[in-house]
Image (tube, helix red, strand yellow):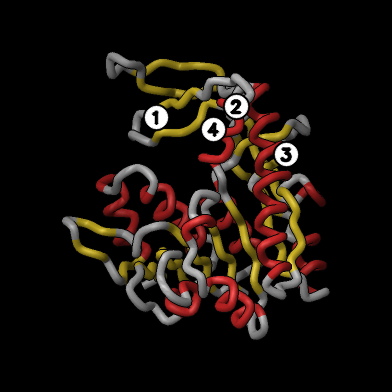
Amino acid sequence: MIVIKIGGSVVDGLHQTTMADLKKISETSKVVIVHGGGKEVTITANKLGKTQGFVVSPGGVRSRYTDKETVEIYTMVMAGKLNKSIVRMLVRHGINAAGITGIDGGVLKADRKKKLVIMNDRGRKMVIDGGYTGKINSVDPSLITVLLEKEYVPVIAPVALSEEYDFLNVDGDRAAAYVAGALKASKVIFITNVSGLSLNDSLITHITLEEAKEVLPRIGFGMEKKVLAAIEALQMGVDEAVIASGQTEMPFSKAIAHDNCTVITQN
């Protein structure tokens, strides 16, 4: 079982061999895809006249501020445009794909963040309303399992349900980690636009779970979320996490073979 996370902005830059590679892998392994798409959400929101706000946590992590109107746009873009565009691309290449969200079958449940601690323009901490951003607290893999049993490749949009049944914006990388953990996947692969984690301008080809925890504070925004998601996946029992480029030939096969990527393992 392999869970693959594809960023929404990565899809356009995937190597031309990607779909053939995915089809080959799906014929021998169960594959689940989780996608992102924050860039497309911002583009659509701006077209609708809804200015997007971003906040920075005390730890330096930048994220979208999701108010009521924004979460509706987020859900529309993720569950509609992006999810179905990816499914269409897979089906066109002979891959039997089915698109769902974390809402369907109650797959993703999350705690709505009531308050957010952020840094203001003066570098001081302040507390604001949490909006409609969530932290995943549980995954019900039943619907995913049914699709896999029927030989579909599930394509999951990271929209979750709160306890009050609100739509919540959840991080795609961490959604992939939680899905991988719930499915007891052997590996989770994070496809991005770089070869993996670099420190001091050098690609880290292998790192252990404990080493990843130690270097996390030194990692820049973007990659930091992927390494954090990898750590969470391994803590939930996934054997290995791989961070790899989607802009190289046969990207999934290369990631599985640990070719020019970052591999994070238990030890």
In the picture shown, does residue 170 fall above or below 252? above
Residue in the image at 28% along x and 19% along y: 123
For residue 95, which quarter of the picture?
Answer: bottom right
Screen quadrant of the C terminus: bottom left
Helix, strand or loop under label 1 = loop
Whether residue 80 sits left or right of residue 250 in the image: it is right
Evaluate if marks 3 and 1 touch, with contact meaning CB atoms under 8 Å apart: no
Residue at the disc numbered 2: 47
Screen quadrant of the N terminus: bottom right
Helix, strand or loop under label 2 = helix
Q: Position of residue 161 (x, y in %)?
A: 73, 39
Give the distance between the C-alpha atoms of the residues marked 3 and 1, in whole angstroms.
23 Å
Name the amino acid, label 4: Thr
Name the amino acid, label 1: Ser
Evaluate if marks 3 and 4 touch, with contact meaning CB atoms under 8 Å apart: no
Give the distance between the C-alpha atoms of the residues marked 3 and 4, in whole angstroms.
21 Å
Residue at the disc numbered 4: 42
Badge 3 or badge 4: first in the primary sequence: 4
Residue at the disc numbered 1: 57
Helix, strand or loop under label 3 = strand
Give the distance between the C-alpha atoms of the residues marked 2 and 4, in whole angstroms.
9 Å
Q: Position of residue 162 (x, y in %)?
A: 71, 35
